[in-house]
Amino acid sequence: IGGVMKKLIPRNTTIPVRRSDIFSTAENNQTLVEIHVIQGEREIAADNKSLGKFKLTGIPPAPRGVPQVQVAFDIDANGILQVTAMDKTTGRSQSITIQGASTLSQQEISQMIRDAEKFAEVDRLKRERVDKRNRAEALAFQAERQLREVALDYGMQFAGRSRQRIEMLIRELRDSLEQDDERGIDQVGVDLQDALYDLKREISIYTSEEGDDDFFGSVRRTISGDDYKPRERYDYETRVYSRPPDRFSSNRPSRSYQSKDWNDDDDDWL
């Protein structure tokens, strides 16, 4: 996503060698992924040497980030590179063989290293911007998914004000992404995480109070002799409503969040 490179086999790795990683889709219901095989030291794919491209098709439609595509790099003792992509759900695979992947001259290698050193700071800033956008897009998608799950489990009337605020912040975040407003992405991203956390608290309070009502109601019905048939209810605490990780650089010093790694499945570049 965003044209960044994911390094699988570092320079000076002893051959033969095999390395693999898991990637995923960037859009909902995406049924194919393109694998771009590149060689070089730069962070951005376009700044490196392209070795080849191929597509893996037939991926079952699913929400973004759900499909798992395993991409494996195999370099044999003769320097022949084979890249294989396999959808772990269907077992469908596609591959490409590249001759002479390890035949760069020492002069070419030295030039690549010099370029990487020369543009290291520029590449780092580009990578940070791309990563920030990817995290913001993932946060907006996660927020939409949680709103759907809340509506399904608790009804459309539950936490109406909180849900409206989250919907508004999702729109604002996407507007900031469209306008390439980095400050807006930071600020709205933090606000959206706060709103999701507040919604989680409402769910926790609601389920706690509902549990108390069920307990005392059953006691009253036992004393009065009324028949009691418990209402089926989901245990919402098993869902992923933990406080979202903070990966946005807020300028508000009074806030601090626990952070955890986001899923890097959206790196389609190799």
Image (cartoon, helix red, strand yellow):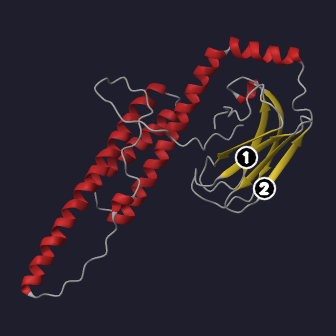
| Quadrant hosting residue 4 | top right
Vertical placement of 208 versus 13: above or below? below
Q: In this image, 87 relative to 258: left or right?
A: right
60 above or below 80? below
For the point 88% across and 23% down, the residue is: 104
Residue 213 in sight here:
yes
Q: Residue 189 in the image: x percent, y percent?
A: 41, 35
> Where does the image place residue 152, in percent across and percent down from the top left?
39, 65
| Disc 1 residue type (three-letter) | Val
The residue pinned by badge 2 equals 93
Q: Image point 33% across, 30% down: which residue?
A: 256
Quarter the C terminus occupies: top right
The location of residue 214, given as percent across then percent down, is 18, 72
10 Å crowding of disc 2: few (<14), some (14-19), many (20+): some
- In what quadrant of the picture does the N terminus appear? top right
Q: Residue at 43% of width from left, 43% of height from top?
A: 170
Q: Tell me the SS state at disc 2.
A: strand
**Type of amino acid at the residue the image marks with label 2:** Ser
What residue lies at 88% left-to-right and 43% top-to-bottom?
97
Q: What SS does tag 1 mark?
A: strand
Q: Is residue 155 among the parts visible in the rendering?
A: no
Q: Nearer the viewer, residue 259 or 67?
A: 259
208 up-or-down from 100: above or below = below
Query: Which residue occupies the foreground of this view, 76 or 252?
Result: 76
Q: Distance from label 2 to label 1 (Cα)?
A: 10 Å
Give the residue pinned by disc 1: 71
